Structures are given as C-alpha cells and as structure tokens.
Image (cartoon, rainbow, N blue to C red):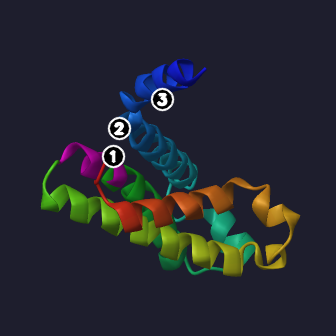
C-alpha cells in the first residue's frame, strides 16, 4: 500500500506547477468575462442598478479586464517584474472583491450565500496571487 501511495504522490508532484497555472487562468478568465460583459462603456447596468457615476462604472469594467490580462501576462514573465505584476493583479482583485462585497452583496456577510458564490473564490484567488506571486 505504501508503494502505491508513493507512486501516486510522485505522479502528481510532476504536475504541481500546473496547479497555479490552472488557478491563474481560471481567475483571469472569470475577470475577463465579467469585465467584457460590462462593455460598451460606460456600463449602464452598473450605473442604473448601483447608482454609480459613469466614470466609476467604466473604471470597474476596465479594472476587471485589466486584472485578467495582468494575471495572465504576469504568469509568463519569470522574473521580479512578472512576480510584481502577479501580486499587483492579486491586490487589485482583493480590492475589487471587497468593494463588490460591500456595495453589491452587502447582505451576504457572513452566510451561506457568500460561501456558495463564485465571488468568494475570486477573492480567495486574489489573496493567493497577492501572497504567492509567481513562486511555484
């Protein structure tokens, strides 16, 4: 049994670097989709539903798209600049998600709705990249 467990562990050790890559592309894709769905600018849905100014609503849309792009690009740059871009993207995600929780989903603190939504996982993904950067 121990030999079998070691073989399984060794097999997956070869793929550890892919785990961060899958998370990176999943989080980035989610932000790209959310941001692109707010185009053309200014996003009328954000303006009307949340009573945001056109400038702030446009900033949110551009920020979401930008963070998705930055997270992907940061992953391909294997030096301190890529690490910084990844951490900056993570920081931006955390700030965006805190504001989304506070403004759009204030009624979610702390209940099952929060923990069954994709938003909490986007927030956790942002924390992950803020803390970990590009380290594999």
Mark 1 to mark 2 CA distance (whole Å):
15 Å
- Which is nearer the N-term, disc 3 or disc 2? 3
Whether residue 108 sits left or right of residue 91 in the image: it is right
Mark 3 or 2: the one toward you: 3
Is residue 84 shown to the viewer in this render?
Answer: yes
Is residue 58 shown to the viewer in this render?
Answer: no
Q: Which residue is mark 1?
A: 72
Q: Picture coordinates of residue 122 (x, y %)?
A: 58, 58
For label 1, the SS is helix
Badge 2 density bin: few <14, some 14–19, many ≥20, Cα 10 Å: few
For label 2, the SS is helix
The part of the chain drawn in magenta is: 71-77
- Please identify the dominant SS of the magenta region: helix
- The residue located at (20%, 56%) in the rendering is 82
Q: Quadrant of the N terminus?
A: top right
Q: Nearer the viewer, residue 55 or 128?
A: 128
Q: Is residue 72 highlighted in magenta?
A: yes
- Which is nearer the N-term, disc 1 or disc 2? 2
Residue 69's place in the image compared with 86, above or below, is above
For label 3, the SS is helix
Residue 17 is tagged as 2
Mark 3 to mark 1 CA distance (whole Å):
28 Å
Q: Picture coordinates of residue 48 (x, y %)?
A: 71, 72
- The residue located at (57%, 52%) in the rendering is 34
Q: What is the total number of numbered labels drawn onto the structure image?
A: 3
Q: Picture coordinates of residue 55 (x, y %)?
A: 48, 77
Q: Quadrant of residue 80?
A: bottom left
Marks 3/2 in contact by CB < 8 Å: the verdict is no
Mark 3 or 1: the one toward you: 3
Mark 3 to mark 2 CA distance (whole Å):
14 Å
Mark 1 or 2: the one toward you: 2
């Amino acid at each position: 049994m121990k030999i079998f467990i070691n073989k399984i562990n060794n097999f997956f050790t070869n793929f550890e670097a892919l785990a961060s890559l899958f998370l990176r592309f999943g989080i980035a894709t989610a932000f790209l989709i959310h941001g692109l769905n707010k185009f053309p600018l200014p996003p009328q849905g954000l303006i009307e539903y949340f009573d945001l100014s056109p400038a702030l609503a446009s900033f949110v849309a551009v920020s979401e798209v930008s963070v998705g792009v930055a997270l992907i690009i940061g992953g391909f740059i294997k030096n301190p600049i890529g690490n910084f871009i990844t951490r900056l993207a993570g920081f931006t995600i955390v700030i965006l998600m805190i504001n989304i929780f506070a403004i759009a989903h204030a009624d979610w603190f702390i209940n099952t709705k929060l923990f069954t939504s994709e938003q909490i996982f986007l927030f956790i993904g942002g924390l992950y990249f803020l803390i970990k950067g590009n380290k594999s």
